[in-house]
Image (cartoon, rainbow, N blue to C red):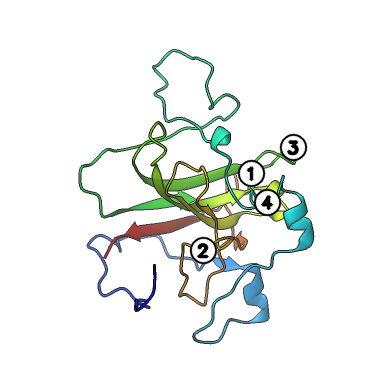
Amino acid sequence: LLKNHTIQMQPSYHPGGMYHESNIAPHHITQTWHQNGKCPKNTIPIRRTKEEDVLRANSIKTYGKKMPQSIANLDSINKPVIPNISTGHQHAIASAQVDNCHGTRASFNLWKPTIARANDFSLTQLWITGGSYSGNDLNTIEAGWQVYPGLYRDRNTRLFIYWTRDAYQTTGCYNLHCSGFIQTDNQITLGGSISPTSTYGGAQYDIDILVWKV
């Protein structure tokens, strides 16, 4: 699909409201690998996939992917509780429906929550969607931070992205585990740990994420 296509390495413009006035001094968010340097120009950092990473998945095809039955429905808390695919998936959301969406921006508080069981995970993310589950044509663009021992082998807070175009049936994946997302930045590793994180009753740290269509 990218035959004869020229990749735009830098946005031609930034949307209004990308930068907001604040009296809080910014603090640079770092990733652990920055201690060993940065990637040269025209290259990108890629988190190494090891054999044991793939072996933890049910199959090679499912490695780095969400399973359709694990995705929570976005039902209102006012609806009666009925058994569905969201059973066991506890979540809280804030959403808005618009007819013509070109993107969104969100600020997330960075935390390192305790994960009690190896197959549990915790995340905060933005989620741009179109289509539906029922028609198996749900399209999503997702980004945020997560603590996910089952995917990363540790309990560190990590930056992630995800996408799908068929309601998580066969397409899409985390980070760069499959084709479909082209990274151009040489400073950030998708799936890489990020720090510092907030402490209860202490210093607080946020991360801003912007997704928009040029």
Residue, disc 2: 179
* Numbered disc in front, either 2 or 3: 2
Which badge, 4 or 3, is on the more N-terminal residue? 3
**What type is the residue that disc 2 sits on?**
Ser
Which residue is depicted at the point 27% across and 38% down? 97
Q: Which residue is mark 3?
A: 117
Nearer the observer, disc 4 or disc 1? 4
Residue at 65% over, 52% down: 63
The residue type indicated by label 4 comes to Leu
Q: Position of residue 6 (x, y in %)?
A: 34, 79
Number of the label disc, if any, that sits on residue 113: 1
In the structure shown, which secondary structural element does the residue marked by tag 3 occupy? loop
Closer-to-camera residue (3/157): 3
* First of labels 2, 3 by sequence position: 3
Hey, what amino acid is under mark 1? Pro
Q: Quadrant of residue 191?
A: bottom right
Residues 91 and 177: in front is 177
- Residue under numbered circle 4: 151
